[in-house]
Image (cartoon, grey):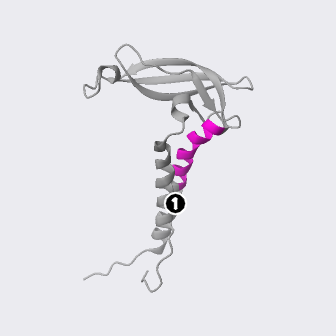
Amino acid sequence: MAIKVKNKASNVFWRIFITLVGVALILLGTSRIALFFLGETTTATIETRRVGGSSDNYKPSMRYEWSVDFSFLDTDGVWHSGHTTRRGGDMGVFVEKTVYYLKAAPFINSLASEVEPNPGQLILPALGTLLILIMNRKPKKGAQT
């Protein structure tokens, strides 16, 4: 019967990797909330195109996936762009024209409806925090490692 020996370097690698994933989840989750409270707003030009086929599981006004590309001019006069997807009907999709962006990093941007605070935005930071806590907890005294 073979005894499995834990490789300490492997354990350290996975601890660091999963901790970094947790940090990334926290940053992703808080970036949209930060856009709402700290971001600048401007008006964007919107281009949409329908992608994929019909999903009959949805009501008629939501059966198609739409690709939404937007471009905006920041306060320094530089053009930036962004991309998102929306669900809509067969003839079009409603997309607001207000964009939030960070003045120091305008590549971090999003449409207004995506940055409005809601309870769902707490899921990613909570999951990231949970990963960090689980991977970096102290072993109990008397436990074998």
Q: 52 or 8: nearer the eye?
A: 52
Residue most extreme to the bottom: 142
Residue 140, percent across and down? 46, 80
**Where on the picture, by quarter, is residue 39?**
top right
Q: Residue at x 65, y 33 (%)?
A: 106
Q: 3 or 66: nearer the eye?
A: 66
Magenta stretch: give its range: 23-37
User: Is residue 34 in the magenta section?
Assistant: yes
Residue 118, percent across and down? 50, 40
Residue most extreme to the right: 76
Residue 141, percent across and down? 48, 84
User: Is residue 55 in the magenta section?
Assistant: no
Q: 131 or 9: nearer the eye?
A: 131
Left or right of 100, for residue 144: left
Q: Quadrant of the C terminus?
A: bottom left
Q: Is residue 14 above or below residue 86?
A: below
Q: Is residue 100 above or below residue 90?
A: below
* Main secondary structure along the magenta-highlighted residues: helix
Left or right of 122, for residue 62: left
Q: Residue at x 49, y 54 (%)?
A: 126
Residue most extreme to the top: 91
Residue density around tag 1, few if under 14, some if 14–19, many if 20 or more, within 10 Å: many
Q: Quadrant of the N terminus?
A: bottom left
Q: How many marks?
A: 1
Circle 1 sits on which residue?
A: 19
| Res 36 seen here | yes
Residue 131, percent across and down? 47, 60
Q: Residue at x 46, y 65 (%)?
A: 134
Q: Is residue 85 above or below residue 119?
A: above
**Where on the picture, by quarter, is residue 107?**
top right
Q: Amino acid at mark 1?
A: Thr
| Res 52 seen here | no
